Image (cartoon, rainbow, N blue to C red):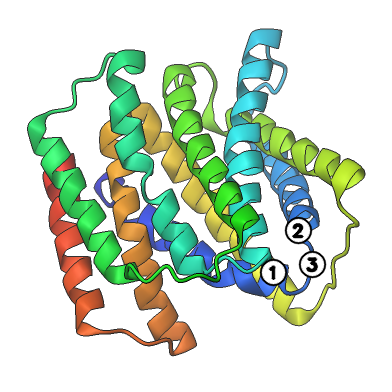
Amino acid sequence: MVKIFPLIFIILWSSAFITTKPIIDNSDPFSALAFRFFLVAIGFYLFSVYSKYSIIINKKNLIESFFSGILFHGLYLGGVFYSISIGMPTGIAALIVTLQPILTNLLSGPILGEEVTMKQWFGILLGFVGAGLVLGFDVGSGIPLLGLIATIIALIAITASTIWQKKLSGNLPLPVSNFYQAVGGCIFHILIIIFFVEPYIEFSKTFIIAMSHQIFLVSFGAFTILMYLIKNNSASKTVSVFFLIPATSAFMAWFFLSENLTIIDILGFLVTSIGVYIATRD
C-alpha cells in the first residue's frame, strides 16, 4: 500500500488545480482558504482526539508546526490561489511551481546534508523538460505582474516548507502536526483578510462541491501523504514526483473539462514519467 502513496498523491494533488477555479469564481481566494483550513483544523483535531494523540505540545514544536503551516497553506496556496484569481493561467502557475524540485535539490544538500546524485539531476532535467512540453512555452504577454510575483513567492514557500518539514518530520504525530499547520494557515489567511481584503464567499453548489473536494481529498488525503513521504524519504526524491502534477492536471482537464490534449502533451507526460522514475529509484 505504501508503495502506491506517490501515485495517490499525484492524482489527488493534481486534481486540486481542477477545482481551484470554481472556488475563486465564487469567493475571494483568502476567504476560501481561511474557510478551508478552519474546517481542516477541526478535522485533524477530532482525528487526533479519536486516535488518542495529545494535542498539548511544547512551545518549540508548536511554533515549528505553525510556521510550517504558514509556508504550506499560507504563502504557497495563497500565492497560487491569488495569482489565478487575477488572471494568471493555471498551467503557467503550475509550471512555475514545478521548479520546486530543482530548488529543493539545490538546497537539500547544504541544509539537510542529502547527497543529490548525477542520476537524480538527470531525472530532474527530464522531468522539467516533460512538464514544459505539457504546458507549452507560449507564456504570452497577458500574464499579470502581481500574479507572476505571487506564483514565485508560492514556489519559494513550498520549497522552504518541504525542507523545513523534513528537518522536523520526526517531532510530532502526523495528525497533530497537520492540526497545528492547518491552524497556522487559517490564521495567516484571516490576517490577510483583516488587513488587505474585503471577504466574500458565495456558497453555491459549485463552491461547496469544489471546496469539499479540496478539504477531504487534498487537505486530508494528499497533504497527509506528502507529510508521510517527506518524513520517510529524502526531500529531493519526494519532490521529484511534483514534475508529474502538471501533466496529470492536463489529462484531468482533458477528461473532466474537455480541454484540448495534444500529441506533444502525451510526449511530455512520457518524458516526465521517465525523469521521475530515474530521479526517485534507488
In contact (CB < 8 Å): disc 3 and disc 1: yes
Circle 3 crowding by C-alpha within 10 Å: few under 14, some 14–19, many from 20? some
Question: Does residue 273 appear left or right of residue 193 in this picture?
Answer: left
Image quadrant of residue 11? bottom left
Circle 2 crowding by C-alpha within 10 Å: few under 14, some 14–19, many from 20? many
From the viewer's side, name the closer residue of 17 and 35: 17
Q: What is the CA distance from the residue labelled 2 to the residue labelled 3?
A: 6 Å
Residue 233 percent across, percent down from the top left: 29, 30
- Residue 98's place in the image compared with 231, above or below, is below
Q: Amino acid at mark 1?
A: Ile
Q: Secondary structure at mark 1?
A: helix
Q: Amino acid at mark 2?
A: Ala
In contact (CB < 8 Å): disc 2 and disc 1: yes
Q: Which mark is residue 27?
A: 3
In contact (CB < 8 Å): disc 2 and disc 3: yes
Q: Which mark is residue 23?
A: 1
From the viewer's side, name the closer residue of 10 and 103: 103
Q: Which mark is residue 32?
A: 2
Q: What is the CA distance from the residue labelled 3 to the residue labelled 1?
A: 6 Å
Q: Amino acid at mark 3?
A: Ser
